[in-house]
Amino acid sequence: MNTETQTKDYQKSVIIKANQIGVFKAVTERIDEWWGEVDIQPDADDVKFRVSFGEAFWRFRVADFELNKRVSWECIESNQVHAGLRGIREEWLGTKLHWELIGNSDDQTKLSFTHEGLVPDFNCYEVCSDAWGFFIGNSLKALVESGTGQPELI
């Protein structure tokens, strides 16, 4: 098996029909409208916040914050639960989520997402990569473009 394939971090890019400010606000201030419940908004460096749905939750620390350009979150606590998957509860612990925005024009933004540490060797990789594809490519995009996302509301 190719070692490079097994250590490649998950990545997703999407073009969103909105300016950078609107996309950044959705990523950092409207998490509950596209992903899951959030206890506080991650709107500055070193803020700690929790995203959850059902039994599953993740606590993050904002590791990097540049308004309307990029934000990174480090997972500092994890209770990941997916039916039928074992050994995943703390798989995200220590991983980092990087969001980078590049405005192509006043009405288009390229959002590049990397989940550093989420690699094919993880037990949750298939479920998590599919979920990120949905939450970023469908839910977040729809929220910004049409006003309605599809968060996990368990």
Image: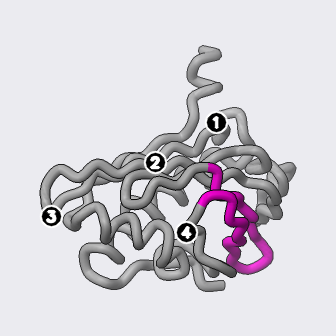
Give the class, few, some or many, for how many residues have Cα within 10 Å of label 4's Cα (few <14, many ≥20): some
Mark-to-mark CA distance, 4 and 3 = 23 Å
Mark 4 or mark 3: whose residue is earlier in sequence:
4
Report which residue position mark 1 lands on: 119
Report which residue position mark 2 lands on: 113
Q: Amino acid at mark 3?
A: Asp
Q: Secondary structure at mark 1?
A: loop
Which one is closest to the eye, mark 4 or mark 1?
A: 4
Secondary structure mainly formed by the magenta segment: strand
Q: Secondary structure at mark 4?
A: loop
Which one is closest to the eye, mark 2 or mark 3?
A: 3
- x and y, in percent, of residue 104 in the image: 17, 50
Which one is closest to the eye, mark 4 or mark 2?
A: 4
Boundaries of the magenta span: 45-63
Report which residue position mark 3 lands on: 107
Q: Are marks 3 and 1 in contact (CB under 8 Å)?
A: no
Mark 4 or mark 2: whose residue is earlier in sequence:
4
Mark 4 or mark 1: whose residue is earlier in sequence:
4
Q: Which mark is residue 43?
A: 4
The image shows residue 144, relative to residue 103, as above or below, that is below
Which one is closest to the eye, mark 2 or mark 1?
A: 2
- x and y, in percent, of residue 79 in the image: 82, 64
Mark-to-mark CA distance, 4 and 2 = 18 Å
At horizontal 29% and vertical 48% (from top left) the residue drawn is 102
Quarter of the image with the C terminus is: bottom right
At horizontal 58% and vertical 64% (from top left) the residue drawn is 44
Mark-to-mark CA distance, 3 and 1 = 33 Å
